[in-house]
Image: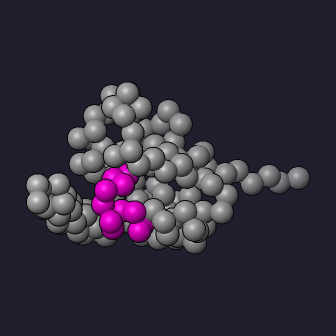
Amino acid sequence: MMTSTKPPALSVWYDGDCPVCRQEVALYRRIDPDDLITWTDIVARADSELPAGKTREDLLGRFHARAADGPWHIGVDAFAAIWQRLPVLKWFAFVFRLPIIRQIAQVAYLGFLKWQRRHRARRNAPA
């Protein structure tokens, strides 16, 4: 008898103050009926609740994902780790592992981070 092996559950740390991040996480939650991914809003956590070895600034600086005690997947690699676990997006994870596509995605992601930091500063500025 063959058994299917599920990948280990993935923990993802995201910026709950980022409107784009919240929308993306909401989409992922809808297409993850098996709860293969645990979503943690960094902003809603106390410093003592953050993973060992990670600061709030580390986690807010780039998207982070990790399966159990495995290695961290950061930035574009975190997206690939998420997509790998979601049947609807599994094929897309492979595409992001192709060197030229990964490089292009990395540049686009860094551009998004610059945009997000500017908007975070505006949202947090005193009125």
Q: Examine the image and state in which quarter residue 21 appears.
A: bottom left
Evaluate whether residue 93 shows in this view.
no
Q: Quadrant of the C terminus?
A: bottom left
The magenta segment is 14-24
Verify whether residue 121 appears in magenta. no
Query: Could you tell me how many numbered marks the image carries?
Result: 0
Task: Classify residue 34 as left or right of residue 102.
Answer: right
The picture quadrant where one finds residue 33 is bottom right
- Locate residue 19: give its quadrant: bottom left
Q: Is residue 57 visible?
A: yes
Q: Which x, y percent locates residue 124?
A: 17, 54
Residue 38 location, x and y as percent? Answer: 54, 49
Give the camera-side residue of 14 and 81.
14
| Residue ID at (43%, 59%) | 80
At 46% from the left edge and 43% from the top edge, which residue is drawn?
A: 66
Image coordinates of residue 114 in percent, x first then y, are 15, 61
Q: Image height check: is 4 above or below 107?
A: above
Q: Residue at x 48, y 57 (%)?
A: 82
Name the foreground residue: 104 vs 50: 50
- Report whether 74 appears left or right of 126: right
- Comparing 8 with 20, the one in front is 20
Left or right: 86, with 74 as reference point: right
Q: Is residue 112 above or below residue 50?
A: below
- Residue depicted at x 22% and y 66%: 112
